[in-house]
Amino acid sequence: LADNALQALHDEDYDVPFNTQSLNHEGLIFMGGRASDSLDGDWTFCVDLLDTGLRQKWFSMLPDAPENRTEPWDYDPYMGETVPVPSNWAMLKEKWYFFEGSAWYTRPLDIDVIDETKRTFLRFGAAAYDCKIFLNGEFIGNHYGASTPFCVELTGKLKSGRNWIMACVNNTRTRDRVPMRNTDWFNYGGIYREVSLFQTPKSLIKDFFLYLVPDGSYNKLCAEVTIDGPLRSEIAHLTIPALCVELTIPINASGHGRVEFAAQPHLWSPETPVLYDAGVDYGEDKVSDRIGFRQIERRGTDIVLNGEPLFLRGISVHEDDATDGKVTSEADLRRRFDHARELGCNYLRLAHYPHHELAAQMADELGFLLWEEIPVYWAIDFENPATYRDAENQLSELIKRDRNRASVVIWSVGNENPDTDARLDFMKNLAETAKRLDPTRLTSAACLVNHAQNRIEDRLAQHIDIIGLNEYYGWYEEDFEDLTAIGENSDPDRPVVISETGADGVIGDKGPKTGLFSEAYMAEVYTKQIATLRHLAYVKGMSPWILYDFRVERRQNIFQNGYNHKGLIAADKKTKKKAFHILAEFYHQIAAGQE
Ligand code: GCB
C-alpha cells in the first residue's frame, strides 16, 4: 500500500519512462506485397480506470499457476476474459460504453525456432489513442494517435516457444492530444484495426514512393526508396511490367535512392482508374504495389486533374458503424462507395482522422478522389511542442501509408481552428511537412469566416492550396442571406471547397414533421444551399455533412439520443432521407454537363 500512496503523489511518475512516443513514423515499414501472420482474434482484456496496471506493473507478471503467485496483483492478464481484436470496447458491453481510460490486451505468440537471419515486427493498423507495447514483461515502446498504423520491432527480443504480447491502450481525452478534449464524434477506444506479425531480411525496404512527376509533361515517373539496416548493395531494382520499366535505383550511404525516368502511363482518373503493378527489390527484400499515375494541381481558383478543371462532387464520411464502431470491413467500405456512387459523387472527404487504409486502396480501384485528414480539430493545445510533434507524426504516418494512392488528392491539416498566431504556425508547419513528404498533392483545411464582415477570412488560406469551408447557413447560422453576402464579399485567389454544410433530419416517427430536426427542413436547407453555391465561380467542390448519421456523446436532445443526424442516410445505413435525393439530382446534373 505504501507504494500506491507514493504513486498518488506523482501520478504520472511511474518508474518506467513510458511516455516516449518511440513508435512513430520513422519506424513505419512499407507493407505492400509483404506476407504477414494475423494476430487478430481473442486477446485477454481488462479495463483499468485507475491505471493500476502501470503502478503494479501487470506487464511484468509472467504466467504462473495461481497457487504459485507470490504477489497479490489485482489482475491476472492470463486468466481474464477475452475480447476480439479488432474491436472497440464501447461496442462490446453496455458497461464499457462510455469508458475512457486504460485497457489491457494480452495474447501469446508462439515461435518455433528463431531465425537469426531475419528481423521480426508487429504492425498495429490503429489503436486509440496511446498504446504501450510490452513483450515478455519488457516495455518496448509507445505510440500516440488514434488512427494511424505503427510497427514494433521484436528482433532479438523474442525467444523460441511461448512469448507474451501486452498492449495498454488509453483513450482518455487530454489537453495535449490530437484531437484534444472536445469532438463531435464518439471516442471509440481500443485496438480497432488489424494486428499482424511479419518478418523481413536484415536489410529491408522501408519506404517506396512512386509517382508521376508533377511538371505537366505526363511522361516522367519518379521512384524513391529508403533502405533500413546494413547497406549490403548500392542498388535496388524497380519493375513496372506493363510499362516495360526495369531499372536500377542507386542507393546512397544513408540508405536513400531516387530515380526519375521516362514512361508513358495511361493516366488515372475517376473515369479511368488505371493502376499498374510495380515492384522493388533490394537484396533479399521485395515489396510491391498497385499504383495509378495522375497530376492534381491548383491553377488560380481551379482544381485541375490531368490538365482538366474539375468539380469535386463529394460527401463527407466518418468511420462509424452502429454495431461495430470504427471497425471497418471491406463490406462497409463497399457500401459507402456504392452509396456515394448513387449520389453521383466523384469524391469523398474522409473526416476527421485517417480512415482504414483499405478505403484509399478501394478508391484507387473504383475511381473516387479522396480528401484525407488528421484530427487537428477545434481547440488544440497549439502552443505545446509535444502536441505539435504528435500532430506532425500522425500526418507523416498517414502520408507514408497512403502516398502511393492516386485517389488521394488532398491532405487536410485541420478543421475549424481558432485563428491565433500559435495555430497559424502550427498548421502552416503541418502544410509544409505535407509538401515536403509529398510534392504531388494539394493541401487544405477547413478555414474560417469573418462573421462581422461576412467574408472568408483566414490567415492560413495563404499557406494551403484549397480553402475548405464549413458553413451551416440554415442550421447553426439562421440568416441564410449571409451566405449570399459571403459569396459576394469574398474574392479568394484559390479554389474553395465547401467541406461541410448540412442540417439534422431525424427520419420517420422519431423526428418532428416540420422545423429543426425534421427531414423536411433538412431537405429545404439542401435546396437553398445548392441554389446559392452553384453560382459561386470559385467554389470548386463540396462535401456536405455527412453520408450517415453517426454516434456521438455530446448530442443528447430528445431527437438526437446520442447521434448526429446530419446523415443523408440514417444510422441503419439504409434509409435515405429526402435530402439525399436533392443532392443526387444536383450531382447527376453536373456530371451530365448540364451546369
Ligand atoms: C462541424 C464539424 C463536424 C460536426 C458538424 C456538426 O463543423 O466539423 O465535425 O459534426 O459541424 O454536425 O455540427
Image: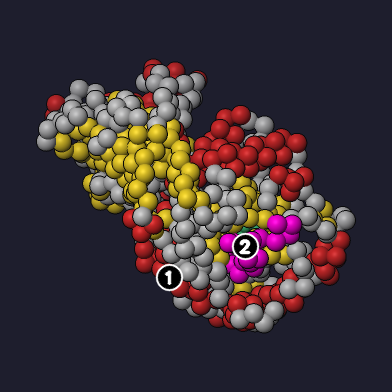
Q: Residue at x 28, y 39 (%)?
A: 285
Pick the residue in front: 246 or 58.
246
Q: Residue at x 77, y 48 (%)?
A: 458
**Residue 197: image location, x then y, percent:** 26, 41
> For residue 105, which quarter of the picture?
top left
Quarter of the picture containing the C terminus is bottom right
> CB at mark 2 closer than 8 A to ligand 1?
no
Q: Residue at x 43, y 35 (%)?
A: 257
> Which disc number belongs to residue 335?
1
**Residue 219: image location, x then y, percent:** 51, 55
Observer-side mark, 1 or 2, equals 2
Q: Is residue 472 above or below residue 22?
A: below
Q: Secondary structure at mark 2?
A: loop
**Residue 268: image location, x then y, percent:** 49, 63
Is 422 on the left or on the right of 389, as rendered?
A: right
Q: Secondary structure at mark 1?
A: helix
- Residue beneath disc 2: 307
Q: Residue at x 88, y 56 (%)?
A: 453
Q: Does any portion of residue 339 appear in the rendered image?
A: yes
Quarter of the picture containing the N terminus is top left
Q: Does any portion of residue 478 appear in the rendered image?
A: no
Please report contact status of discs 1 and 2: CB closer than 8 Å, yes or no.
no
Pick the residue in front: 105 or 48.
105
Asked if the stretch drawn in magenta spans residue 7, the answer is no
Q: Quadrant of ligand 1?
A: bottom right
> Which disc number belongs to residue 475?
none
Residue span colored magenta: 299-317
Is 299 on the left or on the right of 14, as rendered?
A: right
What amino acid is at disc 1? Arg
**Residue 210: image location, x then y, percent:** 45, 48
What amino acid is at disc 2? Gly
